[in-house]
Image (cartoon, grey):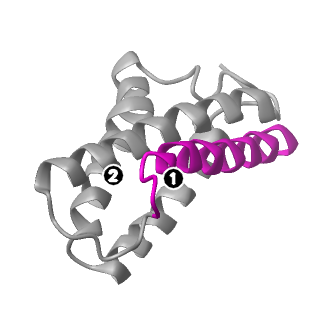
Amino acid sequence: MVFKRGSTTGKGTFAGQSMLGKVIGTVLAPVVLGGVSGLLLGASAPAYWVVQVAAAIGGFFGGFEHHGWRPGLIRGVAGGLLYGAALLAVRALTGWTDTIDLGSVPGLLVVITALAGAVAGALGGVMRARR
């Protein structure tokens, strides 16, 4: 099968993935990365920030699997919510002292990660559409 430029069902797109691939990329990857961030939050500030950058890059490439900013944005919001929730869950389970100040309302981190995921995913979707 030949796919035209800008195809929404070709190799490297969300629609072209198996169900397992979709679950891994959409659910498992953000949760695992968020859990790692939750551990690093209590262990190493520099490593925590490295994972934050990796998560943002992952959000962009997650959005890049979609054609257009809207589906990329939706994917980014979902990934950001899962990432932030996993981070806070692991943080709560460990009970370690944070190496980064999350402010007086740490729960807002989930909103921040969802917004960051939305931006990264939308940018990825735009880049896919222009490709």
Residue 11 visible (yes or no): no
Q: Is residue 127 left or right of residue 60?
A: right
- Counting from the top left corner in percent of width and height, residue 54 is at 46, 63
The percent coordinates of residue 74 (x first, y second) are 65, 28
Which of the 4 image quadrants contains residue 37? bottom left
Q: Earlier in the sequence, mark 2 or mark 1?
A: 2
- Residue furthest to the front: 104
10 Å crowding of disc 1: few (<14), some (14-19), many (20+): many
87 with respect to 112 (left or right): left
Q: What amino acid type should be assigned to the residue bearing mark 1?
A: Gly
Query: CB under 8 Å between callouts 2 and 1?
Result: yes
Identify the main secondary structure in magenta: helix
Position of residue 52 measured from the top left corner of the image (x, y, whole percent): 46, 64
Q: Which mark is residue 58?
A: 1
Locate the C terminus and report the quarter of the image it occupies. top right
- Region in magenta: 103-131
The quarter of the displayed image where residue 76 is located: top right
* Discs 2/1, front: 2
